[in-house]
Amino acid sequence: MNSLRFRILRSHLLVIALTMVIFMLSVMLIIPRVHDRLLRDEEAVFRANAALDGDDYQQKNDPNDGIAPFAESRFPMLPGESTNLRRFENIYRNAVVMAIVISGALSTVIAVVVSITVARVISQPISRLITASRRIAGGNFQAIEVPSANDEIQALAIQFNHMAAALKDAEQRRAALIGDVAHELRTPLASIGGYAEGLIDGVVLPNEKTYIIIRDEAGRMQRLVDDLQALSRAEAGTLTLYPAAVDMHDLVARAVTLLDGKTTEAQITVAVTHQHASEPLNADADRMVQVVLNLLTNALRASPPQSVIHVATGRNTQSVWITVTDAGIGIAAEHLAHIFERFYRVDPSRARTTGGSGVGLTISRAICEAHGGTLTVQSDGLGRGSTFTISLPRDN
């Protein structure tokens, strides 16, 4: 196990073990030396006292023989053996205390040094993450180096890089959104401004045709504003839904009816097939009609005259689904992953009048997800049409 908690536990155990080893070794090395020095000091004091008292003290052993000769041979002649024993006890106690103090101080210093080193190794990647987070707050979304250790810090660094990439992508999308909105508004505003100046200068006649053009351009701006408002609510997850028991057949019929005029004009047929007599679900009928109508409108724009748009509904044990299939221009593989992005168009050259605002699919997917369902797309490539599939939870 190489998780952070076990690394911290191992570091603590290492510091404890190292401290104990150093402490024991220090005590074993220091006690004999300190005890011998204290014993020699006591012997010197004893000799001085004996000389002052006039005692006939004969040293029977070599003065450098150490502790045992002094303990056993240097005091046997002295009266009051209990006093001598207490002296030896005090000498040994003092030696032990001094050895413990010195060993404890040495062990503490080493333990602090090791702890600081281990703490620095563990905290260094976190410090880099803190620095990187400040950098990201300033608008620099550069990824950080991922530590080689297989632990929580590595996982955090990986997720941090994912977050930085997502924030970078969101910032790019925000900038693109501003540019797209400005581009979408520029054309109708320029048209309205041009006609207004023409009316003021008398170059353009104030007739019904002029007023209709100005009204249509204002309508385009209003639809864009409505789309942007719906998009903001969809992306914020604040779409207002009024779910009720409905049948997918009714939703499809309403959407097809709303599109009758355009399909007749484009000479395109909408063929509807139902797998069952009914496909009940619990949904906001108006929102779902909006989704189906958007898919049908996109299919209508992509389909050539005299073609057929196939709409099919069905259900399984868990969900109700609807597919909208056209035989139109299709979608290349590199565009499939981006087809639901706001203001994304497979063909950027298409104008708003032919290609829509570019947010319809984004809003449609958000509506489906708000119902607990999905909206997906499939296409075999350019010129092979495409199929959009709505899947919603079934009303049992």
Image (tube, helix red, strand yellow):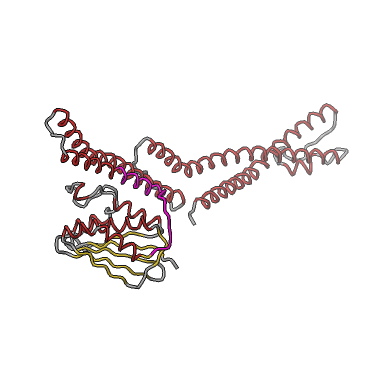
The residue sitting at the front extreme is: 207
Which of the 4 image quadrants contains residue 78? top right
Q: Is residue 386 left or right of residue 164?
A: left
- Name which residue lies at 28% across and 44% down: 224
- Name which residue lies at 16% across and 61% down: 267
The residue sitting at the right extreme is: 79
Q: Give the camera-side residue of 321 and 156.
A: 321
Can you give x and y, in whole percent of width and height, for residue 179 in the image? 26, 39
Q: Is residue 222 left or right of residue 100?
A: left
- Name which residue lies at 19% across and 61% down: 381
Does 384 appear above or below 126? below
Which of the 4 image quadrants contains residue 221? top left
Does 35 appear above or below 279? above
The residue sitting at the bottom extreme is: 276
Q: Give the camera-side residue of 149 and 159.
A: 159
Q: Give the camera-side residue of 211 and 2.
A: 211
Magenta stretch bounds: 225-246
Q: Is residue 71 left or right of residue 375?
A: right
- Name which residue lies at 37% across and 35% down: 138
Residue 332 appears in view: no
Q: Give the camera-side residue of 103 and 333.
A: 333
Residue 228 on the magenta segment: yes
Can you give x and y, in whole percent of width and height, for residue 58 in the image? 80, 36
Can you give x and y, in whole percent of width and height, for residue 332 in the image? 20, 58
Can you give x and y, in whole percent of width and height, for residue 73 in the image? 79, 42
Quarter of the picture containing the C terminus is bottom left
Q: How many marks?
A: 0
Residue 213 appears in view: yes
Residue 150 on the magenta segment: no
The residue sitting at the left extreme is: 203
